[in-house]
Image (tube, rainbow, N blue to C red):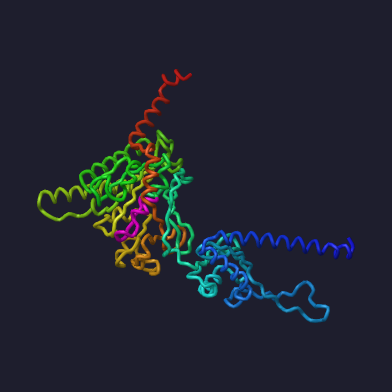
C-alpha cells in the first residue's frame, strides 16, 4: 500500500472513529438520563476523576520517575531524552454512592502508597471517605463514597427464590457501599446486641425471609418480649416456624430440651445416615435441614433471679437449666447442623452467659450507650477501633447500622442493614409454609428409610 493510498483511507478511518465516538456518547447519555439523581452525580464525578488524574497523581505521591533511557540514547538533535514520569493507569466506574477505581500498580507505587494518599484523594474527589484494598496481583481497588451509605436507609424485598448458598448471610452494605456477607457454615452461634429499636429483629427477619424458600432450613423461635406467636416481630413469619415460645420460662425450657434431644439423636446417627461426621461436608438437605434456633431478648430466659421465695427459686432453676441447654446446642450442635442466633439489648453475662457468648464466633452490635457494652458485644479489640464502635451509632440516622469484626482482615466494619417490610415477610411465610417440618420427624423418616434400604427382605423384593 502506497503512502497516497494510506492518506486516501484517512477520511474513512476518521469517520469510523467519529461514528464510534458518537455511539459511545449516545450510550453514555442514555445511561445518564435513565439513572437516578445520586447516580448522575457519581457519573459526573467519575468523569472529573479521569480528567484530573494525570495531574493529581504526582501531587499526592502516586507517580514514579523512569530514569532508564530508551533504546535510542541520543536523539537526532544530540540531546539526551529526559526521564519519564509514569502514572498508574486507572479505570473508573460509578454507582449511586460514588466511584470505584481500579488502578494498576507501578514499582514503588503500590498498596502502601495508595493507602497513604487516600485522605488526599478523598479531598480531591470530594468524597466522604476513600478506601484502598488489593484486587488482583498488581492491581488495587479504590472505593470513594460521595454519600455516606450508613446514613441512607435501605429496604430489601425478598424475591422468594431459593438461595444459591444457604450458609451465606447477606447482611447489607458497609461504609464504602460494598456488599457484606458472613458465612454460617460450621458456625455454632451468632450474637446480636444493641439498644431497642435499632434493628436487631429486622436483621434476623431478613435472614429468615432470604432463606425460607429453601427446604434445607427450619426455624424455632423463642421471643422473650411476647407471650404468644401472634404478637411481636415474628408474627408474620409464624407459618414458617416449626416451634415458637414466648416469655414463659417453662415453655422455653421444653423447647430447648426438645432441641437438645434432636442434637443428641443427630450426633448418634450422623455417620450411619450421612456417611460423614460433619453435615457441612455434604451440606444441609431437606431430610437433614439446618436447624436455626432464634433466641430473641435472651435475658428473659437466662437472667439470674434473686430471692428466697418458692416462685423465685423455681424461676432461677429454670433460667440456669435454660442456659445449660443452650450451651449444649452452641458447643455441640455445629457439626450436626444446629445454629443458634441469640439477640439481646446488652450482651453482658447476665443476659447471655459468658460460657455461651464467648464461643459464638460471629457477633454484631447495633447502637450501645457505653464502651463496656460495646466490649462485651464485640470483644476487647473494639477499643482499638473507636471509629467503628457501636457507641457512635446512637443517632437516629444510624438505626439499622451495626458493627462487626471483619472476616478475613483486621478491624471492624460498620454495616447498613436493610429493612424488610412486614407485608413482604408475611408473603414469604405464606408462600413457603408448606416447607415447614419438625427436624425430629424428618430424622425419624430418614432413619426409617435407611433401615428399609438395608433390610435384606426389602433388597430381595426390589430385585
Depicted 424 relative to depicted 35: above or below: above
Residue at image coords 33%, 53%: 201
Residue 218 left/right relative to 14: left
* Residue placed most toward the observer, 449 or 298: 298
Q: Which residues are magenta?
A: 189-206
Q: Nearer the viewer, residue 265 or 134?
A: 134
Q: In this view of the protein, which residue sits in the foreground, 97 or 221?
A: 97
In the picture, residue 439 is in which quadrant? top left
Image coordinates of residue 306 in percent, x first then y, are 15, 56
- Give the image quarter of residue 382: bottom left
Position of residue 53 measured from the top left corner of the image (x, y, whole percent) = 61, 72
The x, y position of residue 348, in whole percent, is 27, 59
Left or right of 128 on screen, residue 34: right
Left/right of residue 76 with respect to residue 51 in the rendered view: right
- Whether residue 409 is visible here, answered yes or no, is yes
The magenta stretch spans residue 176: no
Q: Is residue 348 above or below residue 76?
A: above
Residue located 81% across and 64% down the image:
11
Residue 142 visible at all: no
Amino acid at each position: 500500500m502506497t503512502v497516497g493510498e494510506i492518506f486516501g483511507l484517512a477520511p474513512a478511518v476518521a469517520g469510523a472513529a467519529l461514528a464510534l465516538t458518537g455511539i459511545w456518547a449516545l450510550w453514555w447519555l442514555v445511561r445518564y438520563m435513565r439513572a437516578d439523581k445520586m447516580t448522575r452525580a457519581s457519573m459526573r464525578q467519575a468523569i472529573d476523576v479521569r480528567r484530573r488524574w494525570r495531574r493529581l497523581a504526582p501531587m499526592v505521591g502516586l507517580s514514579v520517575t523512569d530514569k532508564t533511557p530508551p533504546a535510542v540514547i541520543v536523539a537526532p538533535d544530540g540531546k539526551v531524552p529526559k526521564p519519564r514520569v509514569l502514572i498508574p493507569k486507572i479505570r473508573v466506574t460509578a454507582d449511586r454512592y460514588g466511584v470505584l477505581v481500579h488502578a494498576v500498580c507501578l514499582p514503588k507505587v503500590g498498596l502502601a502508597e495508595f493507602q497513604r494518599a487516600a485522605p488526599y484523594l478523598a479531598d480531591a474527589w470530594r468524597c466522604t471517605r476513600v478506601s484502598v484494598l488489593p484486587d488482583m496481583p498488581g492491581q488495587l481497588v479504590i472505593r470513594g463514597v460521595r454519600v455516606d451509605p450508613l446514613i441512607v436507609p435501605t429496604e430489601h424485598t425478598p424475591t422468594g427464590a431459593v438461595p444459591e448458598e444457604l450458609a451465606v448471610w447477606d447482611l447489607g452494605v458497609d461504609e464504602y457501599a460494598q456488599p457484606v456477607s458472613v458465612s454460617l457454615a460450621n458456625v455454632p452461634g451468632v450474637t446480636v446486641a444493641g439498644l431497642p429499636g435499632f434493628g436487631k429483629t429486622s436483621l434476623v427477619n431478613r435472614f429468615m425471609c432470604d432463606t425460607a424458600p429453601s427446604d434445607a432450613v427450619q426455624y424455632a423461635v423463642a421471643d422473650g418480649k411476647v407471650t404468644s406467636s401472634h404478637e411481636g416481630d415474628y408474627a408474620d413469619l409464624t407459618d414458617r416456624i416449626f416451634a415458637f415460645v414466648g416469655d414463659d420460662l417453662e415453655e422455653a425450657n421444653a423447647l430447648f430440651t426438645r432441641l437438645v434431644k434432636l442434637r443428641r439423636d443427630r450426633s448418634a446417627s450422623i455417620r450411619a445416615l450421612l456417611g460423614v461426621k460433619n453435615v457441612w461436608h455434604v451440606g444441609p438437605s431437606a431430610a437433614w435441614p439446618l436447624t436455626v434456633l432464634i433466641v430473641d431478648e435472651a435475658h428473659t430466659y437466662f437472667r439470674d433471679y434473686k430471692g428466697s421465695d418458692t416462685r423465685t427459686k423455681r424461676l432461677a432453676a429454670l433460667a440456669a437449666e435454660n442456659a445449660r441447654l443452650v450451651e449444649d446446642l452452641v458447643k455441640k450442635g455445629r457439626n450436626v447442623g444446629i445454629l443458634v442466633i441469640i439477640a439481646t439489648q446488652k450482651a453482658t453475662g447476665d443476659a447471655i452467659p459468658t460460657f455461651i457468648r464467648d464461643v459464638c464466633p460471629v457477633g454484631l452490635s447495633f447502637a450501645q450507650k457505653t464502651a463496656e457494652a460495646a466490649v462485651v458485644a464485640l470483644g476487647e479489640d473494639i477499643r482499638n477501633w473507636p471509629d467503628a464502635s457501636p457507641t457512635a451509632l446512637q443517632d437516629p440516622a444510624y438505626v439499622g447500622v451495626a458493627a462487626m469484626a471483619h472476616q478475613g482482615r483486621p478491624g471492624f466494619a460498620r454495616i447498613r442493614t436493610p429493612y424488610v417490610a412486614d407485608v413482604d415477610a408475611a408473603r414469604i411465610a405464606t408462600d413457603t409454609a408448606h416447607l415447614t417440618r419438625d427436624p425430629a420427624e424428618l430424622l425419624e423418616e430418614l432413619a426409617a428409610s435407611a433401615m428399609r434400604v438395608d433390610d435384606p427382605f426389602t433388597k430381595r423384593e426390589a430385585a
